[in-house]
Image (cartoon, rainbow, N blue to C red):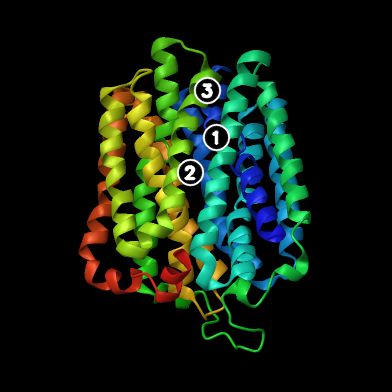
């Protein structure tokens, strides 16, 4: 119990470490006179770097027994790179700091998934990871609310102080997890240290058709999704000249509160609908969100726009890692598979700010939202086209269902 509570505390404080200043970077750089396309290009470079690093991070998590040390090191580097934004002024310096932060943060999700799997095994993974994600989204709510208030009260530099504080508490939480609580064979998807890996090469991942379709669907979804929140905040602030940090915090808090409920509900939905149905709902949320963002680009519109963001992202935050564990159980390649799926997701997320920023510069914010929402329809099309292959692979296992009760 103490170990799982420390794990959930780590998930809570890791939220700010993973995101850095997150969506605040758009309005932060906008306040320094940057154009939308310049901001988009920096975010794209960081996303591409994370995309390249993520499968390597997953392989590292699979191969090392020092998972707690790895989390501590990644947390320190990501935080220092985020803090460097305070002093960076040139394009090269700001882009470099974001690249280093993104690469370091790419280690955290597969490491957290591996530690969770090593503590609760595959049968309890979806429920425990759901609890982790509830804590993670709660951390995002707390971080965004505090960042909005501190930014309004003391200026944007206070947001960076908050990131540093969350990083310290994340490191303390890691150290509270006993090393003996983690079974390192289970942490990479094996039953025991005596088992030999059935699949030893990364090429084997490409032969798993459900895994490939999942990665492609996530890439298309995040091509439309990743730029929407930063652009929405920039669009509303530019049009109405509201307080940048307070409005951006509001958008995050609304979405993350919904994500808490979605993450809590996901293991229960998986029990009745399977992973296929749960992810189908998440794919449907984004096209509607893009249309609403284009129609209601004001303070009132933030509610339906961010509620839909919370539904889609909250369901995926639990369902995707749990489905990867289900697809790769027994291979010893669970965490590198988590990294591969995250890389596919990162392809879309990395290109999205560049696409969104260019569209906003050329056609305005409303046109960009409609186009980004239309791109994500491809996820829905893939899920329906490969339904016959995906449904059996995405059905909830009896062991997982029992643990959800």
Q: CA distance from mark 1 to mark 2?
A: 9 Å
Q: In the picture, which quadrant includes the N terminus?
A: bottom right
Image quadrant in which you'd find residue 25: top right
Q: In the picture, which quadrant includes the C terminus?
A: bottom left
Rendered residue at 47%/37% (across/down): 257
Q: Nearer the viewer, residue 73 or 399?
A: 399
Q: Position of residue 17 (x, y in %)?
A: 65, 42
Residue 213 lies left or right of residue 60; in this view the side is left
Q: Nearer the viewer, mark 3 or mark 1?
A: 1
Q: From this view, report whether residue 142 is shown above or below residue 351.
A: above
Q: From this view, report whether residue 294 is shown above or below residue 80.
A: above
Residue 334 lies left or right of residue 300; in this view the side is right
The disc, 1 or 2, on the residue closer to the chain's N-terminal end is: 1
Give the label on residue 141, or none: 1
Q: CA distance from mark 3 to mark 1?
A: 18 Å
Give the label on residue 27, or none: 3
Tell me, yes or no, whether the two marked residues, 1 and 2, touch with CB atoms within 8 Å.
Answer: yes
Q: Secondary structure at mark 3?
A: helix
Q: Position of residue 162 (x, y in %)?
A: 69, 30
Residue beneath disc 2: 260
Q: From this view, report whether residue 362 is shown above or below residue 220.
A: above
Q: Position of residue 351 (x, y in %)?
A: 42, 44
Image quadrant in which you'd find residue 85: top right
The disc, 3 or 1, on the residue closer to the chain's N-terminal end is: 3
Q: CA distance from mark 3 to mark 2?
A: 25 Å
Circle 1 Cα neighbour tier, 10 Å, few/some/many (<14 / 14–19 / ≥20): many
The disc, 3 or 2, on the residue closer to the chain's N-terminal end is: 3
Circle 2 Cα neighbour tier, 10 Å, few/some/many (<14 / 14–19 / ≥20): many
């Amino acid at each position: 119990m103490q170990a799982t509570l420390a794990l959930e505390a780590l998930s809570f404080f890791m939220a700010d470490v993973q995101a850095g200043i997150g969506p605040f970077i758009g309005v932060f750089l906008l306040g320094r006179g940057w154009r939308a396309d310049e901001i988009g290009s920096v975010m794209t470079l960081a996303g591409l770097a994370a995309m390249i690093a993520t499968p390597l991070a997953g392989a590292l998590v699979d191969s090392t027994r020092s998972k707690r040390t790895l989390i501590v090191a990644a947390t320190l580097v990501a935080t220092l790179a985020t803090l460097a934004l305070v002093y960076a002024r040139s394009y090269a310096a700001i882009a470099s700091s974001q690249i280093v932060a993104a690469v370091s943060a790419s280690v955290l999700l597969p490491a957290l998934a591996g530690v969770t799997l090593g503590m609760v095994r595959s049968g309890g993974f979806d429920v425990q990871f759901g609890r982790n994600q509830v804590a993670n989204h709660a951390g995002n709510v707390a971080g965004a609310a505090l960042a909005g208030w501190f930014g309004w009260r003391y200026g944007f530099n206070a947001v960076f102080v908050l990131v540093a504080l969350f990083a310290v508490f994340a490191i303390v939480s890691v150290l509270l997890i006993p090393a003996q609580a983690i079974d390192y064979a289970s942490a990479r998807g094996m039953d025991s240290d005596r088992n030999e890996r059935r699949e030893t090469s990364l090429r084997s991942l490409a032969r798993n058709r459900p895994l490939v379709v999942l990665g492609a669907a996530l890439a298309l979804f995040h091509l439309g999704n990743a730029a929407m929140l930063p652009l929405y905040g920039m669009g509303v602030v530019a049009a109405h000249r509201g307080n940048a940090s307070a409005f951006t915090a509001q958008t995050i808090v609304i979405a993350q509160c919904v994500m808490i409920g979605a993450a809590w509900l996901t293991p229960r939905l998986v029990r009745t609908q399977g992973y296929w149905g749960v992810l189908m709902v998440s794919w449907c949320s984004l096209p509607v969100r893009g249309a609403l963002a284009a129609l209601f680009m004001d303070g009132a519109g933030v509610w339906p726009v961010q509620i839909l963001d919370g539904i889609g992202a909250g369901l995926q935050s639990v369902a995707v890692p749990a489905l990867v564990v289900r697809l790769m159980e027994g291979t010893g390649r669970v965490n590198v598979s988590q990294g591969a799926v995250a890389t596919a997701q990162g392809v879309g997320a990395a290109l999205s700010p560049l696409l969104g920023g260019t569209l906003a510069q050329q056609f305005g914010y409303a046109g960009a939202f409609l186009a980004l929402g239309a791109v994500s329809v491809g996820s829905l099309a893939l899920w329906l086209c490969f339904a016959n292959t995906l449904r059996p692979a995405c059905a909830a296992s009896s062991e997982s269902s029992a643990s959800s009760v």
